[in-house]
Amino acid sequence: MAIDTSGTWRNWAGNVTARPVREVTPASVEELSSAVRKAADDGLRVKAVGTGHSFAAAAATDGVMIRPQLLTGIRKIDREAGTVTVEAGTPLKHLNVALAREGLSLTNMGDIMEQTVSGATSTGTHGTGRDSASIAAQIKGLELVTADGSVLTCSPKENPEIFAAARIGLGALGVISAITFAVEPLFLLTAREEPMTFDRVTDSFDELIAENEHFEFYWFPHTENCNTLSNNRSAGPSAPVGRLRGWFEDEFLANGVFQALNSLGRAAPAAIPGIAKITSRGLSARTYTDIPYKVFTSPRRVRMIEMEYAVPRHALVAALRELKTMVDRSGLRISFPVEVRTAPADDIPLSVATSRDSAYIAVHVYRGTPYQAYFDAAERIFTAYEGRPHWGKLHTRDADYFAKAYPRFGEFTAVRDRLDPDRRFGNDYLHRVLGD
């Protein structure tokens, strides 16, 4: 087990920093348990941190920072049960590749795969789906190291109350050491990307959701233009994007050129509306068929700051139109598109989709660009529609808000009180969102 006297830790976006007393890199569950017990002996708080892709300070600590990069790899594949058990520090990109080699896949996933499996699930990372929900909703079991160093095995049959809460636990209940996911035989998805006007996509939103297993779209502020993405299962044959076209569209244009245009917009905000009109008109349709992770995910190298809220799905169009009106009437200059996705209701206490079909609206700004006025105005709109913010992205809500927004919030905090009465796994962010 590696132990370092730590310097300053920064998240991927650079908006969160922390100075832990020490960083610990355990290579086994036993070493992880020992690190938690040692922290308790020293009177220090403990937080695990993955790749730092959260924009919120969920993993920041002034105590012991657990780095799980040695807790990686697949422990077990159970083909009969349709599950895979994986170490908590495994990056999603490594899990996806390993599963594909075994002829297996997760049912749904988010649009990037840089995060660790424990970091992604603990903050409620999601993609889009008519019938299939977040990555955490695919969890069938997990292993949790609690405040006294005990190792709990949790599932719907074993420690069921802890299992229910810990699937999206914000690191507040302990340190996850392994996760068991439901998997299925590898399948193909046909992706259709198509430009649409804002009015067309919002007027037909319900139909687009009903007709597609996975549907999302991006609206470009200061324009009437959107880009839609529909993913549906296919019998094949496989027809992936060609290597040259993929590099040109997904790397050169979507990352390289987009980075340059955002840098220009940051230096000259008045140019942003014109840039948005030109770039959004340049979108073209394309169709391809490939295995799931090559369709669901894409490289996102342009660093930004993000806020995302889930509203009731029936309220999506009204909320989005209000957001558009606000941007159009303001002096804001927004260079990043607004992303819209959906998810069915689930049964996880702290899932933003708990107990209701949901739609997500994500707003972004280029890193280094002022965001407070934009996010504040957007948040006022989202909260008026009973929005629930993504746990790993920026927001200003607190425990009083969440106690009203989540019907099972008290169930989660009761489990937390039982497992961590001394708040060994606490930090300032958890104090705000969960209370004490």
Image (tube, rainbow, N blue to C red):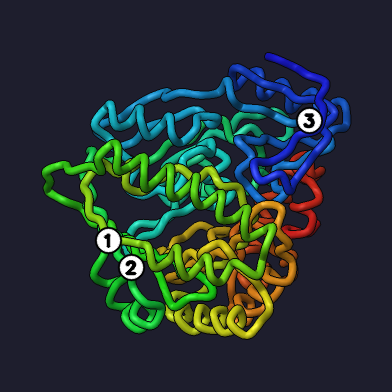
Report if the CB atoms under discs 1 and 2 are less than 8 Å apart: yes
- Say if mark 2 contacts mark 3, CB within 8 Å: no
The circle drawn on residue 64 is 3
Q: Which mark is residue 285?
A: 1
* Circle 3 crowding by C-alpha within 10 Å: few under 14, some 14–19, many from 20: many
What distance separates the C-alpha of mark 2 from that of mark 3?
48 Å
Near mark 2 (Cα within 10 A), the count class, few <14, some 14-19 or many ≥20, is many
Relative to residue 367, is residue 47 depicted above or below? above
Q: Label 3: state its secondary structure.
A: strand
Q: Residue furthest top?
A: 1
Viewport quadrant of the N terminus = top right
Q: Relative to residue 417, is residue 390 depicted above or below?
A: below
In three-dimensional space, the C-alpha distance between marks 1 and 2, rounded to whole angstroms, equals 7 Å
Element assignment for label 2:
strand
Residue 195 is left or right of residue 325, and the answer is left
In front: label 1 or label 3: 1
Front-most of residues 212 and 42:
212
Q: Residue furthest right?
A: 43
Q: Which residue shows up at 52% across the image and 65% down it?
A: 275
Earlier along the polypeptide chain: callout 1 or callout 3? 3
Q: Which residue is mark 2?
A: 195
**Secondary structure at numbered mark 1:** loop
In the depicted structure, whether residue 75 falls above or below residue 301: above
Please name the residue shown 30% across and 29% down the image: 78
Give the mark toward the camera: 2 or 3: 2
Which mark is first along the chain, 2 or 1?
2
Q: Tag 3 or tag 2, which sits nearer the N-term?
A: 3
Query: Where residue 372 sits: x, y (%)?
Result: 74, 66
Q: Amino acid at mark 2?
A: Pro
> Which residue is painted at 30% across and 38% down in the image?
244
Q: CA distance from mark 1 to mark 3?
A: 49 Å
Q: Nearer the viewer, residue 432 or 395?
A: 395
